[in-house]
Amino acid sequence: LNFKGYNFERSLVDVNLLENLDDFEVRDDDIFIVTYPKSGTIWTQQILSLICFEDHRYRTKHVDTMDRAPFLEYNIRSMDFLSRPSPRIFTTHMPYYLVPKGLKKTKAKIIYVYRNPKDVLNSFYHYSKMVIRLEAPEDPESYMKAFLDGEVVGSVWFDHIRGWYEHRHDFDILFMMYEEMKKDLRSSVCKISRFLEKELNEEDIDAVVQQATFKNMKSDPQANYQSILKNEIGIRGCDAQFLRKGTIGDWKNLLTMDQSERFDRIFQRKMKDIPLKFIWDI
Ligand code: A3P
């Protein structure tokens, strides 16, 4: 579904909500996670909910990540957003121009997580093969074309990051890089909690870090989307997992040298005036 120039996953999106987003009431203490798909969304949902809620940090309350930090546009479990107690964490893949206007006027905070787009493409390729609702890619070459042309859910990666970067002064926003989170999770957790003005002691930080590692999330049914994947999203094959590899540079197993160089040329042209740092490799 293309709504105002952006591709949503048709069968999961709440069109009524999209049409009324301008009126969506944002609270000062709301927190939004914004990502292009496959950039570390589920990971950030886990980290944020562990930082914000002691119940989740110490596992005294059993709530799936998806319900702790629900998607605004994909309200899969028909949650009543208005009755949710503060602080509310929301997740969205939307471009800057579609999010509720109230986000500019309130003190609500945004964490924008980005990842090198070759790994995004690679992760998306494997995800699209696995998920019934998405068109299965034929081969890496045609998928790379579709990705670069924005013929995927999330539209053009370059437009998404540029839009949010260029409009960063309109919001209270922190840019986080997937690869830096991967290289130093503890520092990233500290950085996010400082930004949220939610200072944690050493023990709390340890608890967050421990439950946000790839290995622990992958084996944690609350954190790995397993039930959502199987019951609400729908997968091809039964051993599919949302947390696939979680590494930096796995794109090298998908793209040829020629494809990678073509990608680089487009990246250099399109991103030359955006000073964000990228890591492609370990
Ligand atoms: P891969 O397919 O490369 O493994 P999103 O949540 O935005 O859809 O992103 C999914 C990607 O983030 C997947 O990448 C997934 O494995 C990775 N991921 C999820 N949790 C992670 C974690 N704790 N550490 C590192 N990567 C993680």
Image: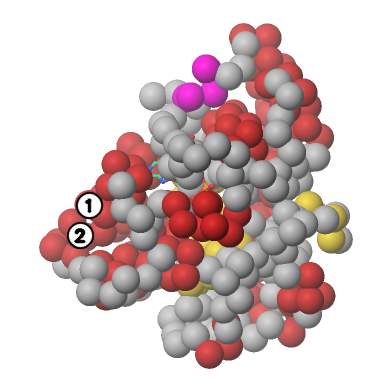
- State which quarter of the image contains the N terminus: bottom right
> Which numbered tag is attached to residue 44?
none
- Give the left or right position of residue 178, taking residue 256 as reference: left
Residue situated in front as seen by the camera: 32 or 138: 138
Residue numbers of the magenta segment: 249-253
Q: Residue at x 41, y 52 (%)?
A: 224
Query: Which residue is labeled 1 in the image?
Result: 210
* Amino acid beneath label 1: Gln
* Crowdedness near tag 2: few (<14), some (14–19) or many (≥20) residues, C-alpha within 10 Å: some
| Residue reaching furthest to the bottom | 83
> In x, y percent, where is residue 60?
23, 74
* CB within 8 Å, label 1 to label 2: yes
Kindly state the secondary structure of the residue where label 1 is placed: helix
Q: Which residue is drawn at 58% across and 88% down?
A: 82
Marks 1 and 2, how far apart at CA: 5 Å
> In x, y percent, where is residue 72?
62, 70
* Amino acid beneath label 2: Ala
- Give the left or right position of residue 180, taking residue 24 as reference: left
Q: In which quarter of the image is residue 214?
A: top left
Query: Which residue is labeled 2 in the image?
Result: 207
Q: Residue at x 54, y 44 (%)?
A: 39
Indicate yes or no whether the magenta region holds residue 251: yes
Q: Which residue is drawn at 19% across and 65% down?
A: 204
Residue situated in front as seen by the camera: 216 or 113: 216
> In x, y percent, where is residue 120?
58, 36
